[in-house]
Image (cartoon, rainbow, N blue to C red):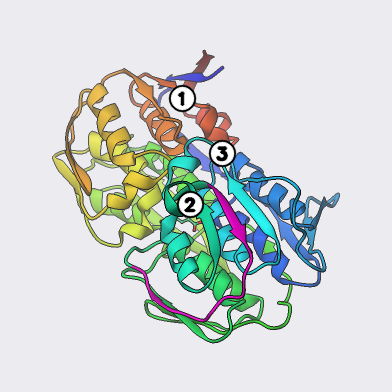
Amino acid sequence: MNALHVSPKGDFSLSIDTIASDKSISHRCAIFPLLCDEPSYIENYLHAEDTLCTLNIVQMLGADVKVREDGIMVITPPQAIVEPPCVLDCGNAGTAIRLLMGFLSSRQGYFVLYGDKYLCSRPMRRVADPLRSIGACIDGRSDGNYAPLGIRGQRLKAFHYESKISSAQVKSALILAALQADGISTFSEPELSRDHSERMLRGMGAKVLTEGLNVTIHPQRTPLKPLHVRVPSDPSSGFFFAVAAAIHEGCSITLHHMLLNPTRIEAYKVLERMGAEVCFIEKENTYESVGDICITGRALKGVVVEENIAWLIDELPALSIAFACAMGKSTVKNAEELRVKESDRISSVVKNLRLCGIEVEEFRDGYEVLGGTLRSATINSFGDHRIAMSFAIAGTKVAMHIEDVACIQTSFPNFTELLACIGVLHYGD
Ligand code: S3P
């Protein structure tokens, strides 16, 4: 069953406390225990394809992973990283491959990272080049731009790197490398990208200092303190349901235990600017702010999205469904990074919205959507989980047939179970 048919079910008012666990934090919860010499304790780890790949790799590198009866996962690091006898499969996960490039480039041994056909066509030189400039030995197809990537661990030099792109994956890879470098390193980026690595590593005792857009990283000569983390729900996954509420006037959805990190909830604020009612209720704040998000649908109007793009990059496909249902024009600019995600998301969104009868103009770095009435269509997910889920949400407005939906398993295995509360679902080939 690789196709999903979704049609409207009627009005809803829903409270959801099972949005999938945060994918970004889960990847880091698997990798960072390798920097310790005692076990880390992780509650609510995301059991989706992407993060299970990372966990599997961490085990191949020598960690012992056990899930206790109470569901808490215990990751016991090896005394020294094991050189694995086979390749390390990152599946569809950009976060896994890029963070591991940074981590492995200073470890003794030879490591080969690869992934599925989508991951193997995503650019890696954004990480390989700065790492090579400090002594890393990394190679791959197209001069190290595409996986499979071979890495032979080397001694790394300290660096001062000004990244031209705002990417948490690049930043995190370089921070992980800097922790093993021979002096104090600095990293800066044009706009702040998500900062989970900095927060978690600081919590583990690393000297990773943030000042605006600059991060200073001191080399770490001793093992870090282990992690004790409960992974909150993923605001990027929750956002599909936020859009569902926003496009149905009078309907509401409350999302519980959500990560409220400011670099992750910008898309909810865009929905608010468009006219939806949105409120955030913080419930706790340890490494990260966590709480509830309530969204109620109201008449939506068009909006311009051109700032803090890194803070809503993953939510733009779902946001585009709200644009299509709004009065007037919505414009996305400065979002060229969308072209190198799990699919070229500018092209995937534009093509599919046109199939739904919506007028869209495509730019190099974004697109413009003229809100209107969605028409039933057969959607191509292009193997991209966020495209599949965005158009499945559109199906709660008017029937949609989405092809190639297996990719939903990469980040949100219980998505269709939750969608069935607000839409009528049929599966097919
Ligand atoms: C992620 C960072 C973002 C995001 C991705 C997860 C992370 O990518 O799109 O889904 O966990 O660090 P970039 O940092 O490449 O923009």
Q: Is residue 351 above or below residue 269?
A: above
- Residue type for callout 1: Gly
In the displayed structure image, the side of residue 28 where residue 65 appears, left or right: right
Q: Is residue 258 in view?
A: no
**Position of 347 compared to 135: left or right?**
left
Question: Is residue 44 shown in magenta?
Answer: no
Q: Position of residue 323 (x, y in %)?
A: 24, 40
Residues 293 and 344: in front is 344
| Residue 227 at x, y percent in the picture | 71, 68
Point 56% across, 84% down: residue: 218
Looking at this rendering, what residue extends furthest in the right direction?
A: 69
Amino acid type at image mark 2: Pro
Q: Considering only order in the chain, which callout, 2 or 3, is on the residue closer to the N terminus?
A: 2
Disc 1 Cβ-to-ligand 1 distance below 8 Å: no
Q: Earlier in the sequence, mark 3 or mark 1?
A: 3
Q: Which residue is mark 2?
A: 235
Name the image quarter holding the N terminus.
top right
Identity of the amino acid at label 3? Thr
Q: Number of labelled discs?
A: 3
Nearest the eye: 135 or 357: 135
Can you say whether 388 is above or below 218 in the image?
above
Assess whether mark 2 and mark 3 are in contact (beta carbons under 8 angstroms): no
Kindly state the secondary structure of the residue where label 3 is placed: helix
Q: Nearer the viewer, mark 3 or mark 1?
A: 3
Residue 423 marker: 1
What's drawn in magenta, residue-wise? 148-163
Q: Which mark is residue 410?
A: 3
Question: Hey, which quadrant is residue 394 in on the image?
Answer: top left
The location of residue 350, given as percent across then percent down, is 25, 33
Q: Is residue 19 visible?
A: yes
